[in-house]
Amino acid sequence: MITNYEIARKLYSNAQTAYIKADVENSSPVDLVIKLYDGAITYLSSAIRDINGGKINNNNYIRKGIAIIDELLQSLNIKEGGEIASSLQDLYLYMLIELTKANMSSDAARIEHALKILINLKEGWTQIREGEFRRNAHSINTLTLQA
């Protein structure tokens, strides 16, 4: 027999999945990259907190951070992205190596270094998004004035 709790949990899970799907489908590519950075930053911050708190056996947060960075790496288009994509590739590969080493040794300093890189990259993408927003707002204002 299914309990009310199990039904409620399933409904919540379905609603949450639908919300996430809609959020992803309605996000621009730049917004998706920023969300991936946010996820990696959250997981790696949690990994540092756990390591500093003595929970060195739980490396799940590091693995999740690695998975997100790997997804960012796989999404690069080196041919179209040129030098920027190549530089991002180098940074992602470096972070993957550092985080793998950190995962094996519970080294918070290596995670902190990767975290700083991610925060800087996120700030750059946020500036790109703000520039796009300003350009789009200017275009809309121009079209409104012409109408």
Image (cartoon, helix red, strand yellow):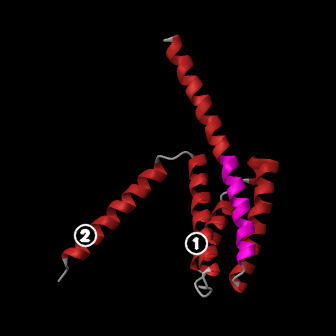
Sort mark 1 into few (<14), some (14-19) or many (20+) by Cα contacts within 10 Å.
some
Which residue is tagged 2?
8
Q: Furthest-top residue in view?
A: 146
The tag on residue 100 is none
Q: What SS does tag 1 mark?
A: helix
Q: Is residue 52 above or below residue 136?
A: below
x and y percentages locating residue 123 in the rendered image: 67, 49
Up/down of 127 relative to 34, above or below: above
Q: Which of label 2 and label 1 is nearer to you?
A: 1
Q: Is residue 76 visible?
A: no
Residues 48 and 21: in front is 48
- Measure the C-alpha gap from mark 2 to mark 1: 28 Å
Q: Is residue 25 above or below residue 109?
A: above
Residue at the spot x=65%, y=60% of the render? 72
Count neighbours of disc 2 (C-alpha within 10 A) and say few if under 14, some if 14 to 19, many if 20 or more. Answer: few
Give the side of residue 113 with respect to residue 62, left or right. right
25 in relation to 94, above or below: above
Q: Main secondary structure of the magenta part?
A: helix
- Give the mark count: 2
Q: Which mark is residue 46?
A: 1
Residue bounds of the magenta highlight: 108-125
Q: Position of residue 73 (x, y in %)?
A: 69, 62
Q: In which image quadrant can residue 119 be found?
A: bottom right
Q: Is residue 90 left or right of residue 55?
A: right
Q: Amino acid at mark 1?
A: Ser
Q: Quarter of the image holding residue 3? A: bottom left
- Is residue 27 in the magenta section? no
- Which one is earlier in the sequence, the residue at label 2 or at label 1? 2
Residue 86's spot in the image, x, y percent? 80, 55
Instruction: From the viewer's perspective, tell me whether residue 116 is left or right of residue 129.
Output: right
Query: Residue 139, position in %: x, y?
Result: 58, 23
